[in-house]
Image (cartoon, rainbow, N blue to C red):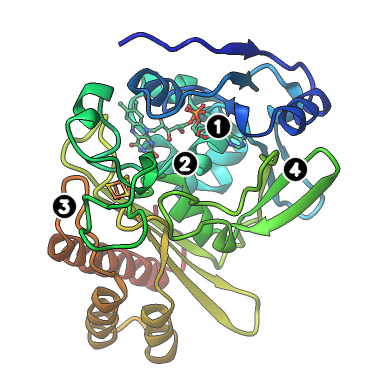
Amino acid sequence: MRLPRFEYLRPSSLHECLELLEGSGHESRVMAGGTDFLVRLKQGVISPQKVLSIRSVQELNFVSEDDKGDLQIGACTNLSDLLRHPLVLTKFPSLHHAINSVGSMHIRNMASIGGNLCLAPRCWYYNQTKQWRHAIEACYRTGGKVCHAISGSKRCHAINSSDTAPMLIALDAKVCLQKKDRKRWVSLKDYFKDDGRHHTVLEKGEMLTSIVIPRETEKDRTTFIKIQHRKGLDFAIGSIGASVKSNGKEINLTLAINSINSAPLILNKAAQIIMESGFNEAAIGKAAEVARGETGAVTNLFTSAGYKRQIVEVLLKQALSELKLTQKKGGTKH
Ligand SMILES: Cc1cc2nc3c(=O)[nH]c(=O)nc-3n(C[C@H](O)[C@H](O)[C@H](O)COP(=O)(O)OP(=O)(O)OC[C@H]3O[C@@H](n4cnc5c(N)ncnc54)[C@H](O)[C@@H]3O)c2cc1C
Ligand code: SF4
């Protein structure tokens, strides 16, 4: 597969990058590590006139800790660099685990954390070569009026497969979104949209520039679990990021599951059951049953809707059991 023709731009500062994005509108696309972007370019599912490579923008490459102990990460920071960073290694072990589960070492050596949070949703009928796609009718995402994954549906149901997304949601992370004349902070819980065509709140000319993760206290407990067909290189068929955080007065449980729908699923009802009844077997069973109902009915990629419900149940039970175990020990297990 050959790359199509495009103009390659390499801004050296964030200011230049935002100016270029604003000026070229829909004609240009941002590329970070390119591990997803270049594949889609070769498959012809995207064909921008201009490609803006942001890899050499220094302001997007950093890891630091602020006065409060919160972790700040530039959007273009490489996943392998994050894995080696002492702050991630020692203070955010579940995030470390989630990052380590993305693709293979070769992918992580190129891929960025921002690219992982902007990863385009995937679909069996879309992430294919041009010839393959030309054999079927165009769908919503390719300019048509049907969805092959869910026939009769009025929207795109491609799957969000980002592994760091559920963990960063559980860690209550925020993302900084910037365009030429505006900067805004959005909680990651509100960043994703359950729509395969427009899967984030990013606007035209806007890009993700950094991520802030509140520090974990000694009482916080977190876990990340990923289910995949083959270990080592595969996308998830389900992954969960879970956390129990305490502000001294009350406890807050967050359960976020991805690779099931177009946006990560935040299982509020299931979490509420545990917060009210505690980490006992009966409550965990009830929460898992409720979570199945919150899952929806999307058959796509390699799993049917029924199988996805089972995956959600298994992930939820496993994550809650791990959090329960660490509660007994009084520490954080990962
Ligand atoms: C074989 C293989 C296996 C993979 N396995 C996994 C896996 O297990 N888990 C997983 O999560 N992913 C997986 N991926 C997908 C991908 O490699 C990762 O999600 C990676 O983190 C993407 O980062 P990147 O920097 O390469 O993004 P790019 O490919 O450069 O970009 C991805 C998308 O994000 C946009 N983008 C990038 N940065 C920004 C920004 N700062 N602001 C706005 N938009 C931006 C791009 O325009 C593009 O649409 C896999 C890919 C391959 C090829
Ligand atoms: S989910 Fe439907 S609309 Fe979306 S890419 Fe797949 S076939 Fe097309």
Could you give the CA–CA distance between mark 3 and mark 2, rounded to whole angstroms?
27 Å
Mark toward the start of the polypeptide (4 vs 2): 2
Amino acid carrying mark 4 in the image: Gln
Location of mark 4 (residue): 178
Q: Which of marks 1 and 4 is in front?
A: 4
- Mark identifier at residue 209: none
Location of mark 2 (residue): 96
Q: Quadrant of residue 143?
A: top left
Which quadrant of the figure contains the N terminus? top left
Mark toward the start of the polypeptide (1 vs 3): 1
Give the residue drawn at x 55%, y 58%: 171
- Give the camera-side residue of 185 and 273: 185
Neighbour tally class for label 3: few under 14, some 14-19, many 20 plus, Cα within 10 Å: some
Tell me the element at label 2.
Answer: helix
Location of mark 1 (residue): 82
Residues under numbered marks 1 and 4 in contact, where contact means CB atoms less than 8 Å apart: no
Could you give the CA–CA distance between mark 2 and mark 1, rounded to whole angstroms?
8 Å
Could you give the CA–CA distance between mark 4 and mark 3, rounded to whole angstroms?
36 Å
Location of mark 3 (residue): 303
| Furthest residue toward bottom | 276
Tell me the element at label 3.
Answer: loop
